[in-house]
């Protein structure tokens, strides 16, 4: 599991980081495990003052970091509207590959095999509970 500093998350404020650090949460993989369930986000909201919606968004970002080989392409994938494992697992790998190639060119693009692997991992490890446990 990648261990990224919380500051790596898009949209996280220094105050959010301070509050999470105050609860002993120092890395993205720690945060992911503490926001996977709705009840846990609710509990962490009470302890940190960070809204459940923000914690869910941070958790989604942390979950995307768990996909092997995707980190380098996260900015591109986000621009394509894929911001969670739920949206990634719904993608057709060949179509996603085409979109990434269009965005970055052939020289900087992942292989089709890489993209197929991302989607298969997303289908296997989508463990974020969204919308209060409802799908």
Image: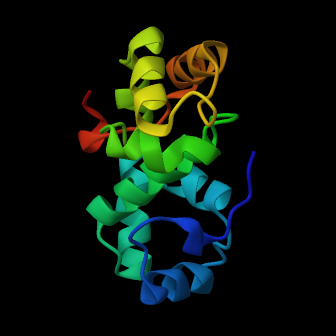
114 to the left or right of 89? right
Q: Residue at x 44, y 59 (%)?
A: 58
Q: Residue at x 49, y 38 (%)?
A: 104
76 versus 120 height, above or below:
below
24 to the left or right of 9? right
55 versus 96 height, above or below:
below
Which is nearer the eye, 62 or 118? 118
Q: Quadrant of residue 24?
A: bottom right
128 versus 118 height, above or below:
below
Picture colour scheme: rainbow
11 versus 52 height, above or below:
below
How far across and down, in percent of the image, does residue 134 sit? Answer: 25, 31
Q: Quadrant of residue 92?
A: top left
129 to the left or right of 124? left
Which is nearer the eye, 30 or 13? 13
How far across and down, in percent of the image, does residue 120 sit? Answer: 57, 15
Quarter of the image with the C terminus is top left
How far across and down, in percent of the image, does residue 27 sit? Answer: 67, 66
Which is nearer the eye, 102 or 8? 102
How far across and down, in percent of the image, does residue 1 sit? Answer: 75, 45
Give the number of marks.
0
């Amino acid at each position: 599991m990648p261990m990224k500093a919380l500051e790596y998350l898009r949209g996280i404020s220094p105050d959010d980081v301070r509050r999470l650090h105050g609860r002993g949460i120092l890395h993205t993989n720690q945060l992911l495990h503490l926001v996977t369930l709705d009840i846990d986000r609710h509990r962490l909201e009470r302890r940190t003052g960070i809204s459940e919606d923000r914690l869910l968004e941070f958790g989604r970002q942390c979950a995307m970091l768990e996909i092997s080989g995707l980190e380098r392409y996260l900015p591109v994938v986000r621009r394509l509207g894929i911001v969670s494992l739920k949206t990634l697992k719904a993608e057709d790998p060949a179509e996603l590959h085409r979109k990434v190639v269009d965005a970055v060119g052939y020289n900087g693009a992942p292989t089709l095999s890489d993209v197929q692997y991302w989607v298969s991992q997303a289908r296997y490890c989508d463990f974020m509970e969204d919308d209060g446990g409802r799908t």
